[in-house]
Image (cartoon, rainbow, N blue to C red):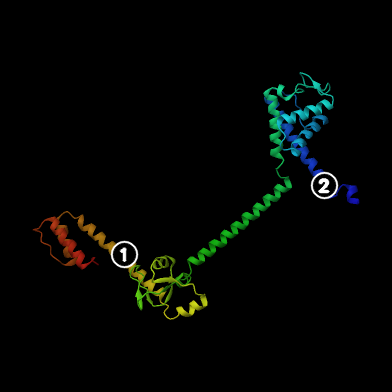
Amino acid sequence: MDDLAKGRHPFFSLIQENLMKLSTIAMLCHSINAAYCLSQGDDSQPTWDNAPDEQKKSIEYGVQLHLENPETTPEQSHESWLLQKEKDGWTYGEVKDFKAKTHPCFRPYDELPAEQKAKDYLFKAMVHLVKDLPEPEEHLAIVNQMAQLQASLAAFKQLAGNQAQSLNTAPAAKAVASGVRVKYVGLKDEYTDRLYESNLVFSYGQTRSVTTDLANKLLKHPEFVRDDAPVALAASSDQAVDDTEATLKKSQEEKESKEKENTQLLDEIDLVRRMEDKDSLYEYAMKNFNQKVPKNQSVEWMKDKVLNLLDTMGVPQ
């Protein structure tokens, strides 16, 4: 009962909040209207604080009309204003006069000039624009929620980055162990992968955990199937020969070494092809292969001879 008497009951708080919002929207609509009138050369509009109470109530009534009836048209809004003015004793007059209660817009909507009709459109647009804006407290709550979400997102990104770094620096054995498990079910008792240069040897029925890239290649062939056995069973079946990591590492090293040799060979071939005199070709063959290339032959013949030495004896060390 004390809460009711002192106006602190939730019902009265809700009414107070609605009245405050109604008054705020009305003040904004009045300010927009005053600015528009000023742009048309009409400086008769007072500030909201200096506006007569009757004018404030009239604007608040218009705001309430649009809030309760969102489909109200500018024409209907003007007609409602006209009825209210008539009820309060207003009449038509070429000059707006609060004391005499005359107004130049006191006439049907169709008779209004375009610049006056525009006011009703601006009024409606302003009401529906402002009505859904949050209260300051609500806005601050939203800002705080956004800040918390951003902080959570930053923490999540940091955690994901740490996990990725941990995975990247983990031993190769763990990377292979957590790969894709493929099982050989071909016709041979033993199969060695030469096609994809892994050099892995599979006994019939053997499962190996390989990289995703290699697994995708092997699983294209009917001799291999994916092994999705439970981890516990998989561990016992893989213990027989667990040289996958070592074999893949050795194959990779051999592949890199071969690629290096091929690169060196191509560089030497390019070097020989760019030689245009017999002395350079002769010295190259003597220095690198201890072979004499006759100078009484053409430059092209000598190039072919030196290139043949490269092919048969390899890149000079």
Foreground: 126 or 70? 70
Residue at the spot x=13%, y=56% of the render? 299
Image x and y of residue 144, in percent:
68, 52
Can residue 32 be seen at all in this image of the molecule?
A: no
Q: Which residue is mark 1?
A: 259
- Residue annotated with mark 2: 13
Q: Nearer the viewer, residue 234 or 270?
A: 234
Residue 214 falls left or right of residue 21: left
* Quarter-of-image position of residue 100: top right
191 to the left or right of 113: left
Of 278 and 92, nearer the camera is 92
Q: Residue furthest left?
A: 296
How would you rate the neighbour count of disc 1 (Cα within 10 Å): few for under 14, some for 14-19, many for 20 or more? Answer: few
Query: Quadrant of residue 212 in the image?
Result: bottom left
Asked whether the viewer can see residue 75, the reply is yes
Residue drawn at (60%, 57%) of the image: 153
Residue 262 to residue 229: above or below: above
Q: Quadrant of the C terminus?
A: bottom left
* Residue 262 horizontal/vertical position (percent): 28, 63
Secondary element at tag 2: helix
Residue drawn 71% across and 34% down? 124
Q: Amino acid at mark 2?
A: Ser
Residue type, label 1: Glu
The answer to whether residue 226 is above or below residue 303 is below
Mark 1 or mark 2: which comes first in sequence? 2
